[in-house]
Image: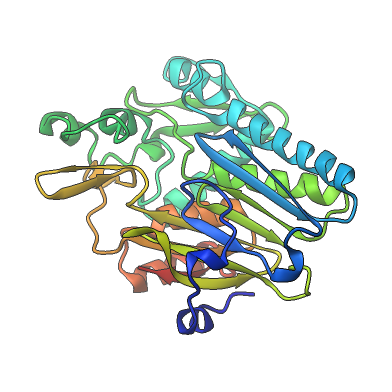
Amino acid sequence: MIDPERSRRSAPTRREFIALGIGAFVVASLPLAARRRSLIRRSVPVMGTIADIAVLHRDGRFAQRAIDAAIEQLRWVDHTMTRFSPDSDVGRANRDAAREAVAVTPATMVVLQEALRWAHASEGAFDPCLGRALELWDVGNRRVPPPAAEIERIAGRRLYADLELDGGALDPAVRFRADDVALDLGGIAKGYGVDRAVAALRDFGIGNGLVNVGGDLYALGNSEDGDPWKVGVRDPDDAEGIVATVEAGDCAVATSGDYIQYFQHAGRRYHHVLDPRTGEPARTARRSITIAAPTCMVADAAGTAVFGMEMTRAEALLRVVSPEARLAHTV
């Protein structure tokens, strides 16, 4: 359940929240009844950020075993789908798939199929094949934009159209039809990892808790007093501020924004959300967009896809690709 209108009427201060995820786009609040009594919580580095898992359970040791299983799923997805390892599915594909079919795990195939669904429906606004462009921009280390000629080479290419998925469910493999194709699943795999972590918690019988990995969060069940969890959306201009809250129960909330990974140059903010049409960071007056959806994989992909879109087009895309997903908040 999401109630953004109610959230805008009564945005709390950061002090009323327990922040889940260092540097996260979204933080979660916990009711007073849950604090220091049955909330079992752990934070670990994974997927290039901090994962924070919190569950409500009377048996602390049991809860820790459930959290262990959830963390194992996050680490497995990270190991399998990161572009920063030559041994991952994505790393092997980026090295060899322009020459030959490269076998991938069924899980990677599931994520790629969903990524292509968003790519085709959004006409390339979401593109899982922008690995070369992201390497070029490298916003975490650059201080000036890359040369214009290099940007123009990748602009408007619709590289996702040169990704082939072969072999079906039993023998999945990928091929690239162009040398400039390179997978980057950063706009969807983190959400998939959260979903797998949530499934691991549920396998242990955990019905109430939170999994937050950076800006991708799933709220299981309700808080201890029976009400939906409250999720605070970070103020892009104030790391200690919250611009709105949404209520979430058995649903995902994910935020894309321009204020975590970026550099400033000549009065412009160059952030990590690229516009495939221009090959540059998306130009938009919007600072962040928050999506609520049934799964975190959908919320993650949707937030990336619609970040630079005009709102009517964004809402139309959500209706087509995932009717249950919706805009929860924009800044």
Query: Which image quarter: residue 262?
Result: top left
Residue 58 picture location, percent across and down:
89, 56
Q: Classify 80 as above or below 39.
A: above
Residue 56 picture location, percent across and down:
79, 58
Question: Foreground residue, 247 or 104?
Answer: 247
Query: Which image quarter: residue 196?
Result: top right
> In the image, is 282 to the left or to the right of 79?
left
Q: Residue at x 47, y 20 (%)?
A: 97
Q: Classify 10 as above or below 28.
A: below
Q: Quadrant of the C terminus?
A: bottom left
Question: Foreground residue, 40 or 26?
Answer: 40
Question: Foreground residue, 132 or 216?
Answer: 216
> In the image, is 194 to the left or to the right of 128?
right
Q: How is the image coloured?
A: rainbow
Q: Classify 153 as above or below 321.
A: above
Q: Residue at x 42, y 19 (%)?
A: 98
Question: Foreground residue, 295 or 230?
Answer: 230
Q: Is residue 221 visible?
A: no
Residue 135 picture location, percent across and down:
32, 28
Residue 308 picture location, percent across and down:
31, 58
Q: Is residue 193 visible?
A: yes
Q: Classify 205 as above or below 232.
A: above
**Number of numbered markers:** 0
Q: Residue at x 15, y 49 (%)?
A: 268
Q: Residue at x 23, y 31 (%)?
A: 142
Q: Quadrant of the N terminus?
A: bottom right
